[in-house]
Image (cartoon, coloured by chain):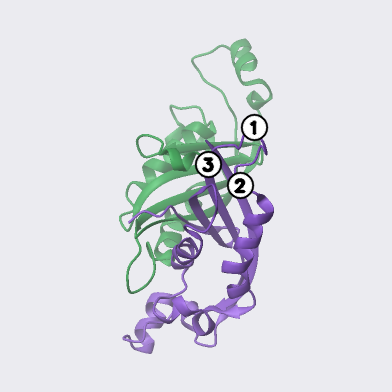
């Protein structure tokens, strides 16, 4: 079993807001992130897949193909977008780093041939990241 | 759903690896240049990994400001710009980063807002140390 990790980057805007709460409550819980004009990050995505090495190709997964899947399923949807306003899954959930990791897992799971999705890691910044392993 | 959140904190401190249990020659042999009597220092990075269910409303495992405030009050204030050897926690222990990592894990046991899975401390970009809660989950080894 080999674990293989591919990185990708996207830049996007977001804010944290719960409609059911007052402005004061949103600001108390989310601080500056509740500014509804939004703010942005350069996100780094790490996609880790697990699988056996093909005895002929020496690959767990074709990296070029993995790159294309990540580009099609995630980067083309998230990059240079406002996550709250333009990405469907964040109409109903707040685009926290945790929720972004879960959403990317759902976008990629089952779409990578010959390998099992193992981990989604999303860096919002170098000192803050979330991991999702598909756990309930 | 369960997610893991990791946050990195930074502090700078000095230390000297030395034990009264050894004589000078043995200290020098075991600890090498880290036994320099004048001490030396590092920029330490502490990476804390907490886990838990993502709150359905806030989208968070735990409130980051609360985690930051805990780390500021209990880790950074304690270790930033200190000589580790002068601290109570190293009065009877060598100030290796193994012992520092264990101490930071012990301190984080009083953080109650999420489960602390792992403390990872980087002493330099080439040396890092991990303390896990119990057995190392296979998925955390990468």
CA gap, disc 1 to disc 2?
49 Å
Q: Name the residue under label 2.
A: A61
Dot 2 alpha-carbon crowd within 10 angstroms: few under 14, some 14 to 19, many 20 or more: many
Number of the label disc, if any, that sits on residue A51: 3
Q: Which hue belongs to chain A?
A: purple
Q: Can you tell which of label 1 and label 2 is closer to the viewer?
A: 2
Whether residues under marks 2 and 3 lie with C-beta atoms below 8 angstroms apart, the answer is yes
Say if residue B87 shows up in the picture. Answer: no
Secondary structure under badge 1? Answer: loop
Q: In this view, does B94 lie above or below B124?
A: above
Secondary structure under badge 2? Answer: loop
Q: Position of residue B50 (x, y in %)?
A: 40, 52
Chain under disc 2: A
Residue A67: name its quadrant.
bottom right
Q: Mark 1 points at which residue?
A: B39
Q: Where is residue A102 in the image (x, y as percent from the top left)?
A: 44, 63
Chain under disc 3: A
Q: Are marks 3 and 1 on the same chain?
A: no
């Amino acid at each position: 079993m080999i674990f293989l990790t591919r990185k990708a980057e996207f830049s996007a805007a977001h804010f944290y807001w719960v409609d059911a709460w007052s402005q004061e409550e949103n600001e108390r819980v989310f601080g500056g992130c509740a500014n509804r004009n939004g703010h942005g990050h350069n996100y780094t995505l790490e996609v880790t897949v697990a699988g056996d090495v093909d005895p002929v190709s020496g690959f767990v997964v074709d990296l070029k193909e993995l790159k294309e899947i990540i580009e099609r399923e995630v980067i083309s949807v998230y990059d240079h977008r406002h996550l709250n306003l333009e990405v469907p899954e964040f109409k109903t959930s707040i685009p926290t780093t945790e929720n972004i990791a879960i959403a990317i897992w759902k976008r990629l799971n089952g779409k990578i041939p010959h390998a099992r999705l193992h981990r989604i890691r999303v860096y919002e910044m170098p000192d803050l990241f979330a991991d999702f392993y598909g756990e309930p | 759903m369960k997610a893991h959140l990791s946050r990195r904190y930074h502090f700078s401190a000095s230390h000297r690896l030395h034990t009264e249990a050894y004589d000078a020659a043995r200290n020098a042999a075991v600890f090498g240049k880290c036994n320099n009597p004048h001490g030396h220092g590092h920029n330490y990075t502490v990476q804390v990994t907490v886990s838990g269910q993502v709150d359905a409303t806030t989208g968070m495992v735990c409130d980051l400001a609360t985690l930051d405030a805990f780390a500021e009050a209990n880790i950074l204030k304690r270790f930033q710009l200190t000589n580790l050897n002068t601290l109570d926690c190293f009065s009877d222990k060598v100030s290796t980063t193994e012992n520092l990592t264990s101490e930071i894990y012990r301190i984080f046991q009083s953080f109650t807002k999420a489960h602390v899975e792992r403390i990872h401390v980087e002493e330099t970009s080439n040396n890092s140390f991990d303390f896990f809660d119990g057995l190392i989950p296979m998925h955390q080894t990468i």
